[in-house]
Amino acid sequence: MEVNERVVYDWILISWVILALITFPVLFKTTAPYGKFTREGWGLMLSSRVGWIIQECPSFIVYLVLFLGSDRRDSPYIVLSGMFLVHYFNRAFVFPMRMKSDKTTTIYVVLSAFFFTVTNAYLIGRGLLYFDAPFSKDFWFDWVRYLGIFLWCLGFYLNLQSDSILRNLRKPNELAYKIPYGGMFRYVTAANYFTETIEWLGFAIVCQTYATWAFFIWCIANLLPRAISQHHWYLQKFDEYKTLNRSAYIPFLL
């Protein structure tokens, strides 16, 4: 029996959203062994820099392959694909090369992130560039698209700024944790998570596809519990942290 890829795609997408909804409450009970929460008992330990490249590069490579194989070359697809690829080129190759210290991560984190980035890039790229209905000719006359692009650009800029603040907190090979200041860290503990969420909210608004909204759901399901865990960690680690009056994830709200 011939397998219809579109049917398989739809089932993967549905399962993907269900998995995000299951993951959300689980991460409130079990903190992922990532970053400052890295601990033994989650498999082989390896270089954070190497692990980061392995886990993030599928987003760039899978989407790029899908883009190059697609016949959709209208300006909306070029712009949207450029947004996705620029983010993940930075995330997969530039970001890890700029790490000032190379700590360790667990193979569990790397493999789970690798699975996520492969699946996510496939769903977004295959949907946007092949399966979803083509954009209409009035794409650039819809103000909502510009709102999405603005939010993506704002989120991307603030995310780079947040990464820079975190990267420059410590001198090379210095391991002690410090409180970050400046940028969106004035308002939230997990500024890097909040700004990336803004970025992918904008992307979902401009694309308006099921897969990009599923990605936004995953951002919240994955990053919100992590942000709250980080907020509690800073409160316990630094006595003065409470006086900063920062939210965990969303300024002034959460």
Image: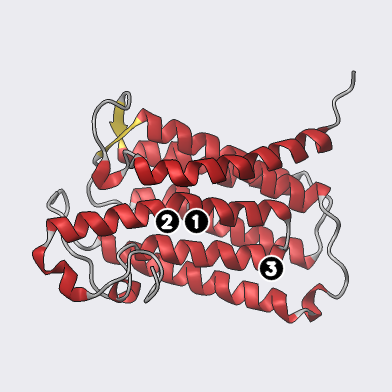
Task: Name the residue that disc number 3 marks.
Answer: 206
2 or 3: mark nearer the eye: 2
Give residue 65's mark. none
**Disc sitting over residue 220 in the figure:** 1
Left or right: 159 as drawn, with respect to 1: left
Question: Marks 1/3: CA distance?
Answer: 18 Å
| Visible residue check, residue 89 | no
Q: Please, is residue 186 above or below residue 162 in the view? A: below
How many other residues sit within 10 Å of disc 2, few (<14), some (14-19) or many (≥20)? many
> Mark 1 touching mark 2, by CB under 8 A?
yes
Q: Earlier in the sequence, mark 1 or mark 3?
A: 3
Q: Nearer the viewer, mark 1 or mark 3?
A: 1
Q: Residue at x 12, y 52 (%)?
A: 176
Residue 206 appears in which quarter of the rendering? bottom right
Indicate the amino acid at tag 1: Ile
Residue at image x 81%, y 52%? 132
The x and y percentages for residue 254 are 38, 67
Q: CA distance from mark 1 to mark 2?
A: 5 Å
Query: What colour scheme does the image use?
Result: secondary structure
Per the rendering, the mark at residue 224 is 2
Q: Position of residue 215 (x, y in %)?
A: 59, 52
**SS category of the residue bearing label 1:** helix
* Alpha carbons under labels 2 and 3: distance apart: 23 Å
